[in-house]
Image (tube, helix red, strand yellow):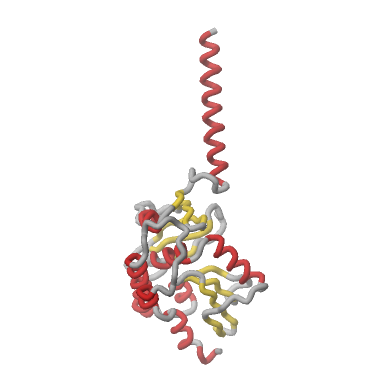
Amino acid sequence: MDNVFKKHWVAWTIMGGFVFLWGLWILSFFGLVPFTYKDIKTPHEFMVFLDSPKDNMQGVKVNGHWIAIGKRPSLQILPGYDEHLYAMKPYRKFKLKPRNMTRPEIVAFCMNITGMGFTKLRSDVSTGNVDVPRVWDGRIDSKEISLIQVGVFSYLVTGILDRPIFIAQAELAKRLGMPMNRILNDLIVSQSRWLDAYMQNNDMNSILPVPYLPVQKAVQKAVQKDRLVIWLDQAYASQG
């Protein structure tokens, strides 16, 4: 009788553990508990996450963004760039192609706009029901292209495809034909200055969400005018 009781107890214990883990996975799947992803509370924690030695895609919740971030070599994407790039896409969207981003680009995106704010902005641009300000409009290869600022170094772009696409500055610059030496010596340098100023002029231990204020003098001076927009004005003025 004791043996039968023990067998039943072991079976119910195993089953209970399985149900508990299954429940945690379900809650994590819907973003209610951080079981299969990391929940970032401060900018400093995000920096530590980006410094992780792991290269594979990892789930993370930061400033309202629920995303997956991994690392990839920069050689084939930005030849001459001596740091790795980050691959970013929405969490659990397995079929979506990740976007390639530098460290300043991904920090600026995640810290500059909340997840809810980005969702609303994308919806406004997609539906056309709200007049969203453009940072650049022009014609490139017979296509009417518009850039809507998202982060300091990222955009929603219309005119390339039949829907707005999210893309970061360096990847977009390469796609639109900016010479690689200018990407490295102009855009990347400007991005690095911004990241240094951001880290020096913000409390990295503040609890998110923390609104990023682009009017901060030190940060604004580090960026000045969007370097990609300056090049677009020069390169495609005759097609406008």
Instruction: Please state if 159 lies on the left or on the right of 214 as rendered.
Output: right
Could you tell me which quadrant the N terminus lies in? Answer: top right
235 w.r.t. 150: above or below: below
Front in this rendered view, residue 107 or 159: 107
Please name the residue shown 59% across and 77% down the image. Answer: 159
Vertical position of residue 93 compared to residue 196: above or below? above
In this orientation, does residue 163 appear? yes
Residue 100 in view, yes or no: no
Asked whether, in this view, residue 52 is left or right of residue 14, the answer is: left
Q: Where is residue 128 in the image (x, y as percent from the top left)?
A: 66, 73
Quarter location, residue 76: bottom left
**Quick one: which residue is furthest to the bottom in this view?**
238
Q: Is residue 175 left or right of residue 122?
A: left
Q: Where is residue 117 in the image (x, y as percent from the top left)?
A: 55, 64
Q: Nearer the viewer, residue 90 or 143?
A: 90
Residue 217, percent from left and from top: 37, 76
